[in-house]
Amino acid sequence: MGYRVVVVGATGNVGREMLNILAERQFPVDELAVLASRKSKGTECSFGDKTVKTEDLDTFDFTGWDIALFAVGSEATQQYAPIAAKAGCVVIDNSSLYRYDPDVPLIVPECNPDDIEQYSKKNIIANPNCSTAQMVVALKPLHDRAKIKRVVVSTYQSVSGSGKDAMDELWNQTKGMYVPGQEVEPSVYPKEIAFNVIPHIDVFMDSGDTKEEWKMVAETKKIVDPAIKVTATCVRVPVFVGHAESINIEFEDHLDEDEAREILREAPGIMVVDKREDGGYITPKECVGEFATYISRIRQDSTIDNGINLWCVSDNLRKGAALNAVQIAELLGRRVLKKG
Ligand code: 2RA
């Protein structure tokens, strides 16, 4: 016996990946409902070798449904997630709305699976920000071995993190550079993204950090350890799918690069691709469609006592969003709902 599963926001980048991953991982779905806004009602969505028509989120009754994977913005989540949760359907939310709520567990199954026990306070579980998810999968096993003091991370985030319109903007701007008269002005981003990088993701805060950078700090503390100091610079790059991160880690205890590499090779959810030769590292193009978080360029940082540098790449629509959400559903099934 399996679960009655709802995917909310099934026509967006993340919603579509949730459906793909539910099918690829053969999650025990007895019945599936795919919801979208009224304007998308009736849109056909692929689920494995089947197609399912979207229903109207506004009129949907969540009663009797087991799990709802939410892949909509915070505004729609605020309106509908409490309705689903109150109807007894466990919400796994990919928006940022509940991530910092002390009554809502923020889960990366490879890092803090036991925290899922707290889900019943609001019947809601939060999925982390994409740039956080891939980073903490690498940090957690290293932290367990040598206690992390401080993390300095620079991200290189693909445009799919901003949605389909941003992917279209990159495509059209790039094309417009070669086709006279087809130049495309920036609209999704404040500046051109084609052949450019933009050091600005989400809104600016009074501190001068952007909200994206604040999220990486706050979420790493909630998922791994509140004592870890994190500073982040989040950059948008002209890549369609796949986030990359340059991560510098300072430990309390000594950890040499070979031991760090072995720990990461053994860690859940990680694939180490790390040879000091041409092509001996992973790039965003190679991670697309994969489940793994890839780690390369593992090396000592000789400027501090206990420092390691590494390169971290993952499909932001998968481990950064849809895969982590489905893994939470799998964990919920194993630990709590126990069907399937
Ligand atoms: C981004 N992390 O990359 C944000 C939201 N997905 O745009």
Image (tube, rainbow, N blue to C red):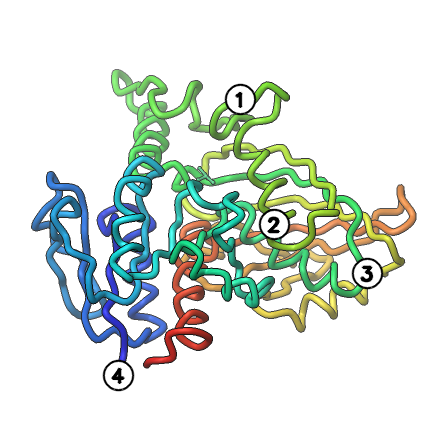
Residue 323 in the figure: left or right of residue 110: left
Q: Earlier in the sequence, mark 3 or mark 4?
A: 4
Tell me the residue that label 4 is attached to.
1
Cα separation, mark 3 vs mark 1, equals 34 Å
The residue wearing badge 2 is 222
What's the CA distance linking mark 3 and mark 4? 43 Å
Q: Secondary structure at mark 3?
A: helix
**What amino acid is found at the position of numbered circle 4 in the picture?**
Met
Question: Horizontal and vertical percent for residue 201?
Answer: 49, 30
N-terminal of the pair, mark 1 or mark 2, is 1
Tag of residue 204: 1
If you read the primary sequence from the N terminus, does the residue marked by circle 1 or circle 4 appear first? 4
**Relative vertical location of residue 338 with respect to residue 123 in this rendering, above or below:** below
Return the x and y of residue 188 as percentages of the image width and height.
35, 25
Earlier along the polypeptide chain: callout 3 or callout 1?
A: 3
The residue indicated by pointer 3 is 146
User: Residue flagged by tag 3: what amino acid is it?
Assistant: Ala
N-term-proximal mark, 2 vs 3: 3
